[in-house]
Amino acid sequence: MTGFPNADAPSPDLLQRCVHCGFCLPTCPTYAVLGVEMDSPRGRIRLMETVWQGRVDVKSDPFERHMYGCLDCRACETACPSGVEFGKLMEGARSQIEAARPRSATERLVRMIAFRFLLPRPAVLGSFAHFSVLSKRLGAAAVLRTIGSRIGVARRLARLLDLVPDRASSRALPATYAARGARRGSVAIFTGCVMRAAFADTNAATARVLARNGYEVIVPESQTCCGALHAHAGERVEARVLARRNIASLEGLEVDAFIVNAAGCGAALKEYGWLLKDDPAWSQRATRFASRVKDASEFLAGAGLSAAPGPLRVRVAYDDPCHLLHGQRIKDQPRAMLAAIPELSVLPLSEADWCCGSAGTYNVTQPELSAKLLERKVGHITSTGAQIVVTANPGCQMQIAAGLRAARAPITVVHLMDLLDRAYRESGDTGAG
């Protein structure tokens, strides 16, 4: 294979869909900030093509810089008239960098800890989350910033602590939540890794909302990380290991849908068929499994709410998570859930469809550009007059909350399912769990 080391290379068929029209350019956050053609979707596709042609080395610094400079927000997919599936191309390109380019011992160690030790182990990740919250409360970030003037890694650790939420919830959920009222069906909730380790209360709120609307909710214990962060970072072998593990554990459940409340996880789970397309033993199983995955707002909007939420007299703005809007093409359903809450004032948010700069691990690997995008996002949010900004992805929640804290803006960030659960509590329905 010319230029690329293995079969995970960006598909020539997908590359050929791009006609280089430039419709993607105005939608690309990195191109908007940097103004460099090679930091646009069109430019990155051109680079992938030149590697296939043997004119650029996959191991070169420029190729890695421009590939990893991408947010993988997939806004270009929404804008593209030719149907270019850029996310699949980008994940393929990054996998080739990891296969071809040797990493330092430190980089290999960091990747091993993150991708093989922390993310697939909920208990370990939960302990790490609580340790991070405690460190933040004890002022570790200030100490690290002081040290950071001399040691660069300390400055980066300080930035990471800024992203840590003020509290983390990792409590175990009940194995089942009984349907309330007339039973409409049964679903299983995908608890995820970061959600399970730091946002377990949101998982519980999601289960309560589903139960209030007539669905028995099963919380399978035998599930693991979806592999989204692995795939985004070029670790496709490990992503496939996790995908097979989830499919084997969950596919036999007799439920109407697998419900996901994290946009990044939902997009990854829905693309298991593509991830395992070259594995004859798993490709069909992966496709069948993916077809049963639904975002929580997607499922509830499609089924319709059978229980009326109570009124909430607050002003909110909704910010679209990239992998919900662009990855899953879910735009109207979350807004329909907000519209179902009486007396809620939903304010328009400029560039709600733009990335906040979180983008998986982008705020860790590309902190400077991530900060510029976050500053832009926070400026739009603070100009709305909203008391709450609503989103539906843990990375977005942590990133935007950190930006609002830094700006000293009195605005909280709330997951859509938490807000809907609060509305049901206001209706006098206290639920369970």
Image (cartoon, grey):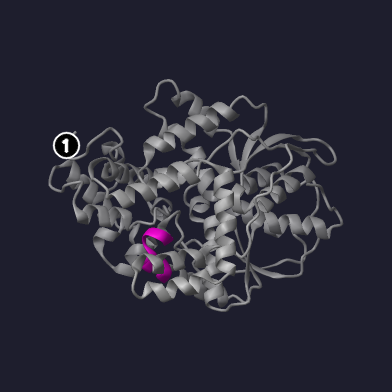
Along the line of sight, which residue is nearer the eye, 78 or 421?
Answer: 421
Instruction: For the N terminus, give its image quadrant.
Output: top left
Residue shown at the point (47%, 73%) measured from the top left: 143
In the image, residue 228 lies at what x, y percent? 46, 44
Magenta run includes residue 392: no
Q: What stretch is highlighted in magenta?
A: 363-372
Along the line of sight, which residue is nearer the eye, 250 or 294?
Answer: 250
Badge 1 element:
loop
Magenta run includes residue 369: yes
Asked whether the viewer can see residue 81, the reply is no
Q: In terms of image quadrants, where is residue 31?
A: bottom left
Q: How many marks?
A: 1
Along the line of sight, which residue is nearer the eye, 399 or 197?
Answer: 197
Residue shown at the point (65%, 54%) measured from the top left: 169
- Mark 1 sits on what residue? 2
Asked whether the viewer can see residue 11, the reply is yes
Residue shown at the point (64%, 35%) measured from the top left: 221
Along the line of sight, which residue is nearer the eye, 366 or 93?
Answer: 366
In the image, residue 254 lies at what x, y percent? 67, 26
The amino acid on which the numbered mark 1 sits, given as a three-letter code, is: Thr
Tell me the chief SS of the magenta region: helix
Residue shown at the point (75%, 59%) measured from the top left: 341
**Left or right of 12, for residue 136:** right
**Does 173 sit above or below residue 67?**
above
**Left or right of 354, for residue 220:** right
In the image, residue 144 lies at what x, y percent? 44, 70
* Mark 1 nearby-residue class (10 Å; few <14, some 14–19, many ≥20): few
